[in-house]
Amino acid sequence: MKTRIFVLLLATALAAGCGAPENSAGPHYVTTINPLRAILAEVVGSRAEVKVLLAPGASPHTYEPRPSDAMAAESALAVFYASEDVDAWAAKLPAKERIAMFAFVPESAHLAYEEIEHAQEGEHDDHHHDHGTDNGHFWSDPSVVKAILPELVKKLSALDPQGAQTYAQNAAKFAADLDKLDTEMKEAFIGLDNRPVFMFHPSWTYFMHRYNLAVAGMIEPSPGKEPTPKFISELIETAKAKNVRAVFTEPQLPRRPAEVIAEACKLPVFEIDPNGGVEGRRTYRELIEYNADMLKKALQ
């Protein structure tokens, strides 16, 4: 029913003359979320325009595209989205080409959801996650972002052959900065690997895995499904048993479950922002540094 309404709204908007904007001087691309925009912006530089569909604070898991999103997608050279488990709705947007950036991640770098939820010691019948096998929130690990650059450049060069040299040069500069950022993060978290925290959702797990940070549990493994009272009670017991240091929320998800656990265990609540898009969290480096600062405050 929602799909039919969406199609009708789009048709109405197009019929009213609100179609795609006139082409700009260079190519333009559309991304679903800010982290993908930030990565793409580093590679395309001034060669192309990159637009993002989701506003800061919106969850890509539960987002429903608007007719304006469809029109933006239709006018772009390509739409870049994360993965089937993050923003699968993007695969249905009308676009010249739809590209899942997780497809560029080497298989050796994939993290499976069952791996990252091992700290919760067993599945709960009333709280199974409904993700796919692999976690598509790859962007929190600078080394993984570096690993996707060759395939990303290849794809962009196929879409815009005249920009191939620019894309390759920008990617090389970005790769060097990612190496530097990775080194900085390794140094920043030395000695903090034995201080477990609760994360709200597996959105920052690649970062935690890369820098050997301990995750004692996930409050909401499935986006849009609030944890049951039974599950929260089990998490409270886990937090006490494992000497959890802090509980994290996310601006895209409800705070209350995290606050209940924090209050019961007398723990501080911090916030990480896996998507960013606001002042101080727009570029890729800014996004990583902001969340790293939040984690350091919690662990120290």
Image (cartoon, rainbow, N blue to C red):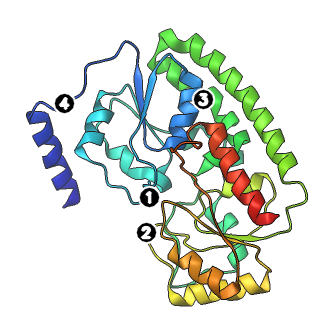
Residue found at the very far right of the displayed protein: 191
Q: Position of residue 113 (x, y in %)?
A: 62, 63
Alpha-carbon distance for marks 3 and 2? 32 Å
Give me the disc on residue 176: none
Nearest to viewer (mark 3 / mark 2): 2
Alpha-carbon distance for marks 1 and 3? 25 Å
The residue carrying mark 4 is 19
Residue 170 placement: quadrant: top right
Q: Residue at x 68, y 77 (%)?
A: 120
Q: Are marks 2 and 1 in contact (CB under 8 Å)?
A: yes
Q: What is the crowding at mark 3: few (fewer than 14 residues within 10 Å), some, or many (at least 20)? A: some
Q: Residue at x 76, y 38 (%)?
A: 181
Residue 268 placement: quadrant: bottom right
Q: Earlier in the sequence, mark 3 or mark 2?
A: 3
Residue type at mark 4 is Gly
The residue carrying mark 3 is 151
Q: What is the crowding at mark 4: few (fewer than 14 residues within 10 Å), some, or many (at least 20)? A: some
What element does badge 1 sit on?
loop
Residue type at mark 1 is His
Q: Position of residue 197 (x, y in %)?
A: 73, 70
Q: Earlier in the sequence, mark 2 or mark 4?
A: 4
What element does badge 3 sit on?
helix
The answer to whether 147 appears left or right of 46 in the picture is right
The residue carrying mark 2 is 224
Q: What is the crowding at mark 2: few (fewer than 14 residues within 10 Å), some, or many (at least 20)? A: few
Nearest to viewer (mark 1 / mark 3): 1
The residue carrying mark 1 is 61
- The quadrant of the image that shows the N terminus is bottom left
What element does badge 4 sit on?
loop
Q: Nearer the viewer, residue 194 or 122?
A: 194
Residue type at mark 2 is Gly
